[in-house]
Amino acid sequence: MTALVAIDWGTTNCRAFRIGPGGEILERRTSAMGIMSVKNANFAGALMDIARDWIDVPAAPPVLMCGMIGSAQGWIEAPYLHLPAGADDIAGKLVLAPDPRREIHVVPGLRGQGAAGPDVMRGEETQILGTGISDGLICLPGTHSKWAQVEGGRIVRFVTFMTGEVFALMRRNSILGRLMIDAPHDAPAFARGLVRSQSAGGLLHQLFTVRTAGLLEGMTREAAPSFLSGLLIGHEMAAVRELFAAKGATIVGAGPLAQNYAIAMNVAGIEAEFMPGEDAAARGLHLVAARAGLVR
Amino acid sequence: MTALVAIDWGTTNCRAFRIGPGGEILERRTSAMGIMSVKNANFAGALMDIARDWIDVPAAPPVLMCGMIGSAQGWIEAPYLHLPAGADDIAGKLVLAPDPRREIHVVPGLRGQGAAGPDVMRGEETQILGTGISDGLICLPGTHSKWAQVEGGRIVRFVTFMTGEVFALMRRNSILGRLMIDAPHDAPAFARGLVRSQSAGGLLHQLFTVRTAGLLEGMTREAAPSFLSGLLIGHEMAAVRELFAAKGATIVGAGPLAQNYAIAMNVAGIEAEFMPGEDAAARGLHLVAARAGLVR
């Protein structure tokens, strides 16, 4: 029996979960139909493509979605909620998608004060709730990595870093990328990048030394991407250490990127724990649905 | 009468000067035939396309070139010279291009110790010499902006920042660029970016606030590029202030970018002077040619 259809609908991907009465995940589906790929804003149709057989049934289960689907570019804009925010706060501010046939609820994003200006998230708040961590620092590495402080089950502060996107731009589109070849992760080069991030001159200068490392220091084209990654993640970590007086943090994820973040955290004196991230959004959506009374 | 044909041959442009016996510029030509556009490495042919009527004459004048033409991707690699380096040092290390018909000399680039690692330049050393400044701090803004300390007519230290390239990548290829429209420079937004660069969280976080400034702080799409520019140049300036204990510096250039650099310098407490940059390479090439005995 389906108690909830939970959808984590982001910019480039859509992940759908069929959830049972006890919160157990009965079925998972992943589609490349991110909101940027939905034609003519036909989100209702895209949802049916992904999960019709879960939804178009007698006694249809409730549907709860999170992520960029709730942005101005998505199906319906769910206005950002101010911090602090926990499951109850979010459950109280769900927005209904304009679907004439069904009740489809959307989780609002959060806004807070970052370190340098306002900061926002959409989707990550649900993953964070899904970790079940009620007190601590949580790291979600990625294109726009997020660090969130949770206290008493509520997100009280978070900060975003464009680390992953800047890496991708430098790798693919910059002059540095011309000196690189895709290759397996090079741990010593990554560590060298972490060390380089602690030197003088700031990031805009240090980035140029990725080039000179190849020209003059024998850095191979295969090692250069790992060096660049270490340099950028090292900068993120230096900021995190300054912003959050944390001895430890939980990384949501377990893949190679999470491993690299753990190394960078250790170098920065922050103890790292891992939590598998794959189902965090589903667990978070189930929690919010329960608090909103959509499931019992 | 032509005393010297001086060529500033970079990655994307080639600028040629016909210079008279007193160092005066008799004629200028600019071509988009940068070294990346030269087919089959036929640099001899490309040079003839640009300046045959200056060179293929009786009592042919000497030809001296600087810039990326002397790199591994250019006509002939002129190995980097170590610092400190002035006109005499450079004149003593000219390299001959492999042209069977003519003597064509190439200026070597320079290498030094930047702030975070080795640093290099090719072409800028000639512009710096061409300023005629024998003592002081010189700023060459651009894709890869350079700051060079000159003492007794010799370059003793320099540091490169990828500011211009990072701006272009963020503007054209990043998620931030989608929130921007090309528009005339917005001075208040630029100043806001300078101020933002002094806040916490580091550059990777502050870049994300370009997005939230649009979402939440009323930053217009037209103003956002100037805000981004101020943020990046502000970071460069903070590093410069830390690395060079300078009260003033000379900006080579006079256009809008140079003006913005001057504003950023003033905010950072560095007094700015301008020097037109258009002919600096030609003057530098003439100086080196004289020291090398190529011209009298």
Image (cartoon, coloured by chain):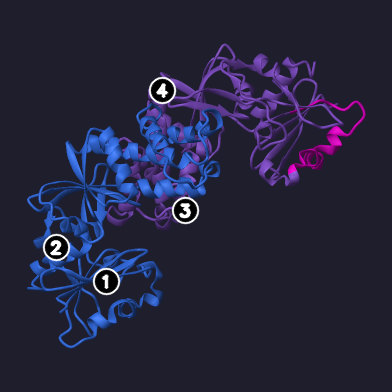
Chain colours: A purple, B blue
Tally of numbered discs: 4
Q: Which residues are magenta?
A: A41-64
The image position of residue B6, as x and y in percent, is 21, 70
**Amino acid at circle 4:** Leu
Kindly identify which chain the residue marked by label 3 belongs to: A
The residue wearing badge 2 is B90
Q: Residue furthest right?
A: A58
Q: Within 10 angstroms of label 4, few (less than 14), some, or many (20 or more) residues?
A: some
Location of mark 4 (residue): A243
As shown in the figure, which amino acid type bears the numbered disc 1?
Ile
Q: Are the numbered discs 2 and 3 placed on the same chain, yes or no?
A: no
Looking at the rendered structure, the kind of residue marked 3 is Asn
Q: In the image, residue A269 lies at what x, y percent?
A: 38, 25
For label 2, count other residues whose C-alpha is less than 10 Å away and answer few (under 14), some (14-19) or many (20+).
many
Kindly identify the residue that appears in the image at 36 percent across and 75 percent down: B41
Measuring from the top left, give residue A264's x and y in whole percent: 41, 33
Q: Residue furthest bottom?
A: B58
Determine the chain carrying the residue at label 1: B
Whole-Å distance between the Cαs marked 4 and 1? 50 Å
Q: Name the foreground residue: A102 vs B1.
A: B1
Separation (CA) of disc 3 from disc 4: 31 Å
Type of the residue with mark 2: Ile
Task: Say which mark, if any, is on residue A173.
Answer: 3
List the residue tagged with mark 1: B76
Question: From the viewer's perspective, is A73 left or right of B223?
Answer: right
- Give the residue drawn at x 70%, y 39%: A14
Q: Looking at the rendering, in which quadrant would you find the C terminus of chain B?
A: bottom left
| Sooner in the amino-acid sequence: mark 3 or mark 4 | 3
**Do discs 3 and 4 share a chain?**
yes
Question: What is the CA distance from the residue labelled 1 to the residue labelled 3?
Answer: 26 Å
Task: Assign a secondary structure to mark 3.
Answer: helix
Judge depth for marks 2 and 1 and give the one in front.
2
